[in-house]
Image (tube, rainbow, N blue to C red):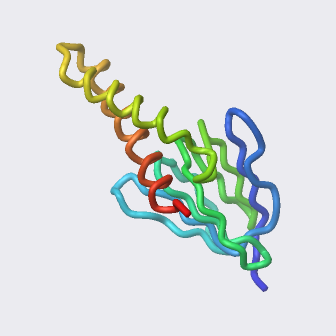
Amino acid sequence: MNTFKLIIISTRRFFFDGEAQSLTLPHLDGGSECFLAHHENTIFPIVPGEMKIVDAQGNTIDAFVGDGFLEFIDNSAKMVVASAEHPDEIDERRANEAMLRAEEELRQKQSIHEYNLSQMNLARAMERLKVKNRHKI
């Protein structure tokens, strides 16, 4: 079986440390990118969205992932991200509040920088809710 070493570190914890068959991450263009064993060496920017890991045993792990980057070198992938959460760890109320707050900030007169930050906050909150709702039991 073709696997690669995968380590995912978020600001709060080690999210994953083990062998994986595949890793699917959100792409800047709105799609996704899938990494398999022996992928070419690369550094990949990560945007907020849904991440999917298939571990060495074939188990699928779905999660929300925040901003960060992936370094895939010599069949070993290391990810550093702002956040990584399983769907059951996402606080739906908090994500809804963050979305409403970001929408209100976008209605306010603000600098270009503040506007861009508000847009990023809104996108992150909406992606969290999408992951949470997609995996409700």
Residue extending farthest bottom = 1
- 38 shown above or below 105: below
Lateral position of residue 68 relative to residue 61, left or right: left
In the image, what residue occupies the spot 68% across and 40% down?
10
User: Quadrant of the rendered structure where residue 13 is?
Assistant: top right
In the image, what residue occupies the spot 23% across and 25% down?
106
- 104 shown above or below 38: above
Residue 38 shows in this picture: no
Lateral position of residue 14 relative to residue 104, left or right: right
Q: How many marks?
A: 0
| Image position, residue 81 (x, y; %) | 61, 41
In the image, what residue occupies the spot 58% across and 53% down?
87
Residue extending farthest front = 137
Q: Which quadrant would the N terminus be assigned to in this image?
A: bottom right
In the image, what residue occupies the spot 36% across and 41% down?
123
Q: Which quadrant would the C terminus be assigned to in this image?
A: bottom right
In the foreground, 93 or 131: 93
| Image position, residue 110 (x, y; %) | 22, 14
| Image position, residue 79 (x, y; %) | 66, 49
In the foreground, 40 or 113: 113
